Image (tube, grey):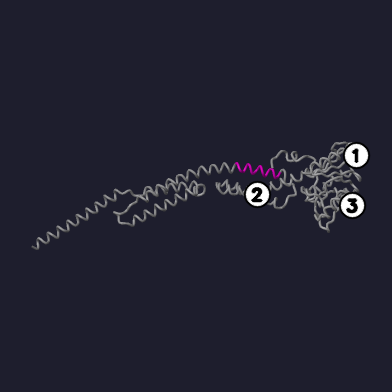
Amino acid sequence: MVLNKKKVIKWIVVVSLSIVFLGITLSIVIVSQKQLPNDDIRLAREALSAAKEAEANIYAEKLYKESVQMYDSAMGNWSRQNSRFILFRDYSKAILFAKRSKSKAEDAEDNSIKLANNLSKNVEDAFVNLGKKIEVYNKLFKKLPLPKSVFDAHNKSKMFLSESKIAQESGKLKEAEILFKKADIYINHANTVAGKMLRDYFNDYGHWKSLVNDAISSSRGGSKVILVDKTAHLLYVYQSGKVIRSYDAEFGSNWMAHKERNGDRATPEGNYHVTSEKSHGNSNYHAALLLDYPNAEDRRNFAIKKKSGILSRSAGIGSLIEIHGNGGKGFDWTSGCVGLRDRDIDDLCRLVGPGTRVTIVGSLEPLSVVTEGLDF
């Protein structure tokens, strides 16, 4: 009886072990039939790495972020499934997320490469266009008495352009594009304000032309006439209808404004005459020719503006406008006078004297000639 019990127990143990072995074998078979996400996640990771190398996180940011999110979902799902009992693990979602991540990463890489190439070309083209705008400023507006805000805008444009080029050379194309746009905004502002100022100034060209023609005509009898072109920064001496001398000239720092009062640093326009000559040693500016500013027209305009309230009651009309020396500084610095180099004022004083007509205008040439056809 005891023997039979031992046999039964042994048989039960054998059967139990067989069942366990069978279960393990079956589990191994079942698990082996399941598709694991290892390869898909590896491929997704490699695709993400390639996309980042192509700077997709900058140039295809949306697609790249979606790919990262899909990869994180795949990893999260894989981790959750691994925590479950082996027979109940299901990696299908992890695999799906990994495949989607890989696909989006590859798209992000392709888009990034295309966009970067386009940006590179766009930025290079933009540099050329911006360079033309800066060239226009330097040719047409640089010497104008512009507001400080315009000078500041021009300088900021050059600064941002320089930084944009550095970024482009470093391969930071997105940053280069942003910096370029800032440069473009500032130079557009500078050119727009300066361009309007120049156009408005040339509204008086018809009047200037009449003054110029009359001055040249008055020289045809042989007398000498001084003609001053403020835009060209030149002083001419005409005789018998022809130029016999020309000198570089500098003016008041506010030379484009109409002279209205004392201290406005504007150089007047109109017909004047030399009233006296101050020789070397008798002038604060080497030598000088004093003009009869203010003339009758200046006084009349001054009185009208004062009466209308444009000028304050305390404003004075000013005086002591001269053609004098100490020039050649390369910028407009006088209080409203016409500044020449010392050797030029000496030469001018040898040619002319008291009574000589002096005609000062904004420009001898129309705006289209002054701007040389440049678009602004």
Q: Position of residue 294 (x, y in %)?
A: 87, 50
Give the labeled residue for mark 1: 223
Of mark 2 and mark 1, the one earlier in the sequence is 2
Say which amino acid is labelled 3.
Answer: Asn
Magenta-colored segment: predominant secondary structure: helix
Q: Which residues are magenta?
A: 125-138
Q: CA distance from mark 1 to mark 3?
A: 27 Å
Q: Nearer the viewer, mark 1 or mark 3?
A: 1
Please state the total of marks drawn on the protein image: 3
Quadrant including the N terminus: bottom left
Of the numbered discs 1 and 3, the one sitting upstream in the chain is 1
Any mark on residue 186, and which? 2
Mark 3 residue crowding within 10 angstroms, few (<14) / some (14–19) / many (20+): few
Seen as rendered, the residue at the extreme left is 1
Using the image, determine if residue 73 lies above or below residue 220: below
Residue labelled with disc 3: 282
